[in-house]
Amino acid sequence: MTSGPGDPQIVPISPVFGAEIHGVDLASGIDDETFRLVHQAWLEHGVVAFRDQSPLTADAQVEFALRIGPLHTHPAAPAEHANAAVFVIRTHRDSSISNGNGWHSDVSCDEEPPSATMLQIQLLPHCGGGDTLFADMEAAYATLPATTRERLCGLSAIHASAHVYPGRYADRSDGEEALATPSAVHPVVRTHPETGRRSLFVNPSFTVAIDGMDSAEGGELLTELHEHCTRPEFQIRHRWQPYDVLLWDNRRVQHFAIWDYWPNERSGHRVTVQGTRPFFDPEGPEPDESPLRLSIGRLA
Ligand SMILES: O=C(O)CCC(=O)C(=O)O
Ligand SMILES: [Fe+2]
């Protein structure tokens, strides 16, 4: 039966961001009103986890993602699924790398990085583990001192992939074509194109330099920002149940897939939605003062 209006129960999992959605069965398809509610919840919470799901066919997953927008194609990852829009996420005994095993926003090196990523994990490691961490870059921005925010609002950063993709995907390509390694310059503080809210848009995987700053000064600033961005106060941790579906907003959050389950296997299917070019709107609103009380990292 198709999920009808009034079905979704949206349960925030932290005061900062992230929510679980119950009462929606994605495999059965959802009506327009249910889609509207879950889409709104996704924009509001940054990450939503659909619980109590069953395996989605590639067509069903693609169909849902297409309701958000046209799909994004990964510049470097090989097509490993009959449906070219599906990116196979799989880590096993012989893997030398594991997808997403470091803080990042998906493909932020693209000129127009993905907006949404939709991931269903279908095989969980037998030993447990394989959780995914998320960090809220709106909270990271809102908790910076006003003078730091002002300074960052005028800066842009270089997001590269030549140091990432060859090591991850060269062994999976046929070697005929050079692997694409895009890079792009993006504002350090971005305005969300749908909510208008500001967030920090740098991540330790792809952001390699501050535009126009020498590498020592830019590197120091990036190190400070990366440390700030991954504070526990901005994080949630998703503990997967079989067939959970996660939908996150790369314009707002970073994520980190923990590889604590070797030699066990974990796998699933990912589909991403094409985003627009990141921008900063100087006329946009500044966030309200954050209620978060940040730790200095030790007791004092
Ligand atoms: O496997 C995961 O939990 C996430 C992997 C990842 O970073 C991604 O699919 O974008
Ligand atoms: Fe990712």
Image (cartoon, rainbow, N blue to C red):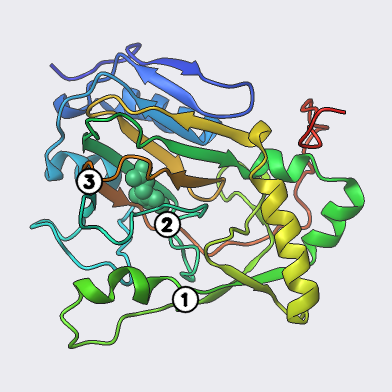
Q: CA distance from mark 2 to mark 1?
A: 20 Å
> Residue 114, labelled with which disc?
2
Is the residue 210 above or below the residue 221 in the image? below
- Tags 2 and 1 touching, CB below 8 Å: no
Q: Nearer the viewer, residue 23 or 98?
A: 98
- Tags 3 and 2 touching, CB below 8 Å: no
| SS assignment at label 2 | loop
Q: Residue at x 12, y 57 (%)?
A: 81
Q: Position of residue 131 (x, y in %)?
A: 39, 35
Q: Residue at x 78, y 33 (%)?
A: 298
| SS assignment at label 1 | loop
Q: Please name which of the two marks, 3 or 1, marks the residue nearer to the observer.
A: 1
Q: Residue at x 79, y 60 (%)?
A: 152
Q: CA distance from mark 3 to mark 2?
A: 16 Å
Q: Nearer the viewer, residue 186 or 276?
A: 186
> How packed is label 3: few (under 14 Cα within 10 Å), some, or many (20 or more)?
many
- Which residue in the structure is indicated by mark 1? 163
Task: Report the amino acid beneath label 3.
Answer: His
Q: Residue at x 47, y 66 (%)?
A: 112
Question: Could you tell which of marks 2 and 1 lies nearer the N-terminus?
Answer: 2
